Image: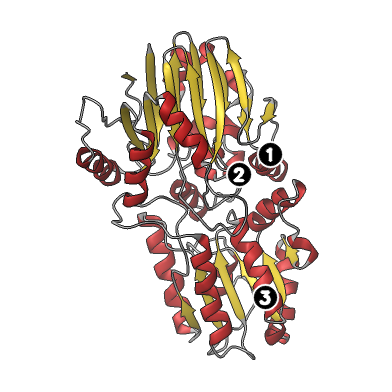
């Protein structure tokens, strides 16, 4: 018997967490936070959500409510698998994982990011963390084995998880894209995916974030060309250049550092989350960004760095947090005067990200854009390609894997319904071999 317990990520965006029961063994897949709810806490003056207890975080909607899962299945949980280092898949582990008294399984980069969170938040974390590379297997028992398959995404060492069990194979593919020309790391392991398809996939649980976009998601190499068009073909020799992008997008940060050097500018990286991800990547030797760039974490350091940039604006290239307009990000603090930096007309602010489609993000970015426009800077938006598969990628993925059953995840109801409609186009029938799950409601396969 296979039973799925969707804890988070099936009724709203974020808080990704899924439990899979095979016989008397349970595997938990991801333990993420709602970044929207995290931002709302910060706007209420709670700058350190990690200091709150799990109950308060659950009540605030920041982390999944796993109380009933723990009560019924907690004693059967054998391992918690974290697919990648984005906080909507990882952050809740610091609050929920220990009580299950089992190891956490993740790639080395994800483990380093987790270590940084634990260290920065000064919290105790006693769960054992097992590091496993893509292409490797972890034996849970004679009846259950876990495999990591490499997949491209917007943060390093993202994996799809395959549960090989006595009841069949389950593929968990939450957060991925096809990228034939990645700027860091390798292409998707298509050979292994096709081999798994031949062996047979009984159930596929799949990302639906961008399924409503009727196109293919382009390669990160396209984003590189977009940045080149702006940085090398606009008048900016005497102007300040600020790029706000996702801290977790190490490939893009690395690419921007290299472009800064081509422009003969000194790259400066500002923001705690930037440091968290860059340092994690450096410790496992994925990049060597700190060799070329100055990286600043704390308020005093950032304030001093900005003074230097303002005095010598043509010499520096600033990479910072704030692409979603987050209240405590570096760019937003500059725009609101919390950090002293006087933008001049014709200075460039480049948003190396699209706005994550939630109400909180849209509102915060709109407010930030308004403030920047009042300063008469040149704004370049959406210099970005997504880390999520769009509709035609998901179509191809379903056709490659040919799963017997299909469940969309990682989306609000509109995204989930759009994914089910795509499955219908491919011959799947709702409630027969394609299924809509809701947070907290168990599903038997």
Secondary structure of the residue carrying tag 2 is loop
**Residue depicted at 37% across the width and 23% down the height:** 202
**Residue depicted at 57% across the width and 50% down the height:** 155
Q: Are circles 2 and 1 on residues that touch, CB within 8 Å?
A: yes
Secondary structure of the residue carrying tag 1 is helix
Q: How many marks?
A: 3
**Rendered position, 253 above or below 102:** below
**Residue placed under numbered mark 2 in the picture:** 157
Assess disc 1: are there few (<14), some (14-19) or many (≥20) residues with their C-alpha within 10 Å of its C-alpha.
Answer: many
> Foreground: 232 or 195?
195
What label sits on residue 353 in the rendered view?
none
Pick the quarter of the image with the N terminus: top left
**Residue placed under numbered mark 3 in the picture:** 260
Q: Tell which circle, 1 or 3, labels the residue nearer the N-terminal end.
A: 1
The answer to which quarter of the image holds residue 266 is bottom right
* Residue 82 in view: no
Q: Tell which circle, 3 or 2, labels the residue nearer the N-terminal end.
A: 2
Pick the quarter of the image with the C terminus: top left
**Rendered position, 95 above or below 283:** above
């Amino acid at each position: 018997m296979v039973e799925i317990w969707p804890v988070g990520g099936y009724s709203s965006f974020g808080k990704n967490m899924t439990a899979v029961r095979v016989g008397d063994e349970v595997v938990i897949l991801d333990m993420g936070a709602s970044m929207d709810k995290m931002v709302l806490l910060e706007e209420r003056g709670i700058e350190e959500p990690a200091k709150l207890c799990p109950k308060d975080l659950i009540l605030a909607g920041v982390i999944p409510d796993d109380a009933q899962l723990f009560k019924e299945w907690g004693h059967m949980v054998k391992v918690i698998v974290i697919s990648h280092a984005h906080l909507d898949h990882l952050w809740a582990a610091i609050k929920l994982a220990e009580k299950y008294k089992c190891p956490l399984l993740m790639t080395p980069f994800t483990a380093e990011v987790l270590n940084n969170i634990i260290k920065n938040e000064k919290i105790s974390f006693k769960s054992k963390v097992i590091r496993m590379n893509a292409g490797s297997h972890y034996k849970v028992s004679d009846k259950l084995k876990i495999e990591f398959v490499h997949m491209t995404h917007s943060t390093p060492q993202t994996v799809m998880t395959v549960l090989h069990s006595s009841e069949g194979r389950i593929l968990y593919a939450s957060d991925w894209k096809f990228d034939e020309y990645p700027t860091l790391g390798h292409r998707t392991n298509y050979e292994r995916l096709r081999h798994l398809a031949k062996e047979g996939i009984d159930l596929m649980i799949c990302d639906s974030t961008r399924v409503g976009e009727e196109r293919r998601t382009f390669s990160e190499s396209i984003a590189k060309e977009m940045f080149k068009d702006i940085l090398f073909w606009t008048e900016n020799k005497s102007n300040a250049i600020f790029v706000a992008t996702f801290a977790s997008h190490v490939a893009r940060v690395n690419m921007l550092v290299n472009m800064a050097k081509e422009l003969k500018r000194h790259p400066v990286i500002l923001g705690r989350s930037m440091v968290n991800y860059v340092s994690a990547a450096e410790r496992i030797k994925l990049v060597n960004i700190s060799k070329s760039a100055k990286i600043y974490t704390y308020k005093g350091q950032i304030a001093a760095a900005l003074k230097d940039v303002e005095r010598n604006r043509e010499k520096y290239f600033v990479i910072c947090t704030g692409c979603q307009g987050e209240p405590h990000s570096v760019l937003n603090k500059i725009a609101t005067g919390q950090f002293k930096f006087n933008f001049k007309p014709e200075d460039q602010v480049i948003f190396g990200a699209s706005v994550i489609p939630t109400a909180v993000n849209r509102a915060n970015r709109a407010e930030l854009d308004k403030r920047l426009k009042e300063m008469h800077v040149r704004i370049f938006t959406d210099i970005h390609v997504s880390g999520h598969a769009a509709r035609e990628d998901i179509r191809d993925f379903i056709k490659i894997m040919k799963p017997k059953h299909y469940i969309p995840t990682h989306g609000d109801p509109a995204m989930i319904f759009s994914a089910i409609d795509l499955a219908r186009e491919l011959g799947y029938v709702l409630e027969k071999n394609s299924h809509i799950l809701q947070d907290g409601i168990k599903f038997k396969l």
